[in-house]
């Protein structure tokens, strides 16, 4: 199974009762042997341009493991699902994910080292001030 990012724009009229639409999409994934790893609801956002006479949509992003042969079936089903205005399914590239993770870890390490140096530097003047007070 391959990991995919799935972005779904739901009809904004469903914002109040979005759970039914999400359950329907989850059932589509389940019926096609897909496993949802995570989901992230961004809420109602203004669209760059109207889609099916809608100015807004509810954005929900999923990370899903889908058997490659079932991606087309999921796309076909999402096409005819009334609650879904638009969707995008993109395969995650493992190499790119690894590079991004390494870059994030390197940045965190550099930030931690910089913070450590700043702490060390800020503590040195305090020691000198204490010495000055003791000399007086």
Image (spheres, rainbow, N blue to C red):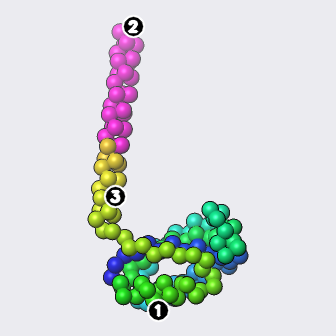
- Residue 88 visible in the current orientation: yes
Mark closer to the chain start, 2 or 1: 1
Horizontal side, residue 29 vs residue 109: left or right: right
Q: Is residue 118 above or below residue 17?
A: above
The residue depicted at 33 percent of the width and 82 percent of the height is 1
What residue is drawn where x is 55% and y is 71%?
60
Mark 2: which secondary structure? loop
Q: Which residues are magenta?
A: 111-136
Give the mark nearer the N terminus: 3 vs 1: 1
- For label 3, the residue is 100
Which badge, 3 or 2, is on the more N-terminal residue? 3
Mark 3 surroundings: few (<14), some (14-19) or many (≥20) residues within 10 A: few
Residue 103, how many percent across, how many down?
A: 32, 53
Picture layout, residue 127 above or below residue 35: above
**Quarter of image, res 64:** bottom left
Q: Which residue is mark 1?
A: 31
Residue toward you, 89 or 29: 89
Q: Tell me where residue 100 appears, x and y as whole percent.
A: 34, 58
Judged left or right of residue 29, residue 11 is right
Instruction: Residue 15: give x, y in percent of width and height.
Output: 67, 74
Tell whether label 1 touches label 2 (CB within 8 Å): no
Q: Quadrant of residue 133?
A: top left
Residue at (39% x, 82% y) in the render: 66
| Crowd band around label 2 with a 10 angstrom C-alpha radius: few (<14), some (14–19), many (20+) | few
Cα distance, mark 3 to mark 2? 55 Å
Q: Which residue is label 2 attached to?
A: 136
Q: Residue at x 36, y 43 (%)?
A: 111
Q: Secondary structure at mark 3?
A: helix
Does 28 appear in magenta? no
Under circle 1, the secondary element is: helix
Q: Residues within 10 Å of mark 1 (few under 14, many from 20)?
A: few
């Amino acid at each position: 199974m391959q990991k995919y990012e799935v972005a779904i724009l739901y009809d904004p009229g469903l914002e109040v009762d979005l759970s039914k639409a999400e359950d329907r999409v989850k059932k589509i994934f389940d019926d096609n042997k897909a496993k949802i790893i995570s989901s992230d609801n961004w809420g109602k956002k203004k669209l760059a341009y109207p889609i099916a006479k809608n100015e807004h949509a509810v954005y929900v992003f999923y990370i899903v493991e889908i058997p490659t042969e079932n991606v087309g079936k999921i796309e076909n089903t999402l096409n005819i699902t009334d609650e879904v205005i638009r969707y995008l399914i993109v395969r995650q590239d493992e190499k790119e994910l690894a590079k991004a993770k390494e870059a994030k870890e390197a940045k965190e390490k550099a930030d931690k080292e910089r913070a450590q140096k700043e702490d060390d530097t800020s503590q040195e003047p305090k020691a000198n001030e204490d010495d000055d007070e003791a000399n007086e």
